[in-house]
Image (spheres, rainbow, N blue to C red):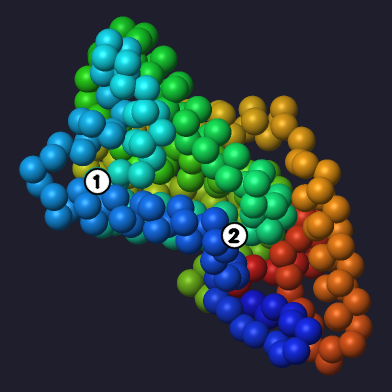
Amino acid sequence: MRRYPSPYTSTFSFGPGPISTALKALIGANVAMFLATTLIRSIDFDAILGLVPVLVIHRLWLWQPVTYMFLHAGLFHILFNMLALWMFGAELERMWGTRFFLKFYFVTGVGAGILTILVSLLGFGFTNIIYVVPTIGASGAIYGLLLAYALYFPDRPIYMYFLFPVPARIFVLIMGAIAFYASIADAGGVANATHLSGLLVGYLYLKGARIHPLAELQYRILKWRINRGRRSKKFDVYSGGRADDWDRRVH
C-alpha cells in the first residue's frame, strides 16, 4: 500500500498509484478493441489490423505497425499486458511526464513492429512464418516499458503479491516471463521477434533520447513539495522517484 500526500487529506492506493488519463486512454482503447474482436466475428481483424509483413510490403497496409498494438489473442494476453502497462507505466509517466511517456510507448511499439517486418525478410524457416502470419498485441511496447523500469529502478523493492520484497530487476524478469508466456500461448511463438524488438528499440531510444527540460523541472518541483510536506506530517510518505532515490518503496 502506498501513501500519496494531499494538501487536505491523506489518500491510500494499491499498486503503483492512480491511473492517469493517458493510461486510461491506452487501456480503454485496448479493451475496446478486444471487445470488438470478440463480439464481431464477421470481420477478420487480425488480418486487417494485425501486423502481417507481406501485406505491409506488397499492399502498403502501412497502418498495421500501429494498429497491431491494440489487438490481443485472448483474455490472459490482454490481462497481463494491461496489468504490466499500469504497474510500470504509471511510475515512468510520473517521472518522465505524459508527453515523453506516450512518445516512448509508441516509438517502442511501432519500432518493434518495423523490426519484426525486417526480421521476417531474413529468409529463415521461422522468419518465413512471421512474414505471413499476423502478429498482434501491445507486448512490443510493454517490453520497452519493462526494460525502462529495470534500467531506472534496478534495486527498487516491490512487494510481490503484497507478501515479500523483490528487487525491481528481478520482478521485471518475472513479470516479463509471465507476459511472454501469455502472449505466445495462442500465437505459436510468432511474437518472439516483436518482444525482443521492443527491448532493443526501448534500449536504443533511452540511450539516444533526452527528457524534455520542462518535464524535468516539473519533477524537481513536485519532489520539493513532497519533501516539504514530509516534515509537517507525523507519518512517512513513500512516493515515486528516481533510481538514485534509494529509500523509495513500491507496494
Local packing at callout 1 (Cα closer than 10 Å; few below 14, some 14-19, many 20+) is many
Q: Is residue 178 visible?
A: no
SS class, disc 1 = loop
Local packing at callout 2 (Cα closer than 10 Å; few below 14, some 14-19, many 20+) is many
Disc on res. 39: none
State which quadrant residue 186 falls in: top left
Q: Which residue is mark 2?
A: 90
Return the disc, 2 or 1, that comes first in the chain's sequence.
1
- Quadrant housing the N terminus: bottom right
State which quadrant residue 134 falls in: top left
Left or right of residue 125, residue 201 in this image: right
- Three-letter amino acid code of the residue under disc 2: Ala
Proximity of marks 2 and 1: CB atoms separated by less than 8 Å? no
Q: As displayed, is residue 209 above or below residue 54? A: below
Image point (86%, 80%), residue name: 229
Disc on res. 73: 1
- Quadrant housing the C terminus: bottom right
Percent x, y for residue 167?
Answer: 63, 58
Left or right of residue 146, residue 35 in this image: left
The residue closer to the viewer here, 95 or 125, is 95
Q: Is residue 15 visible?
A: yes
Q: CA distance from mark 2 to mark 1?
A: 24 Å
Left or right of residue 179, residue 218 in this image: right
Image point (58%, 79%), residue name: 13
Percent x, y for residue 161?
Answer: 48, 72
- Three-letter amino acid code of the residue under disc 1: Ala
Image point (81%, 48%), residue name: 214
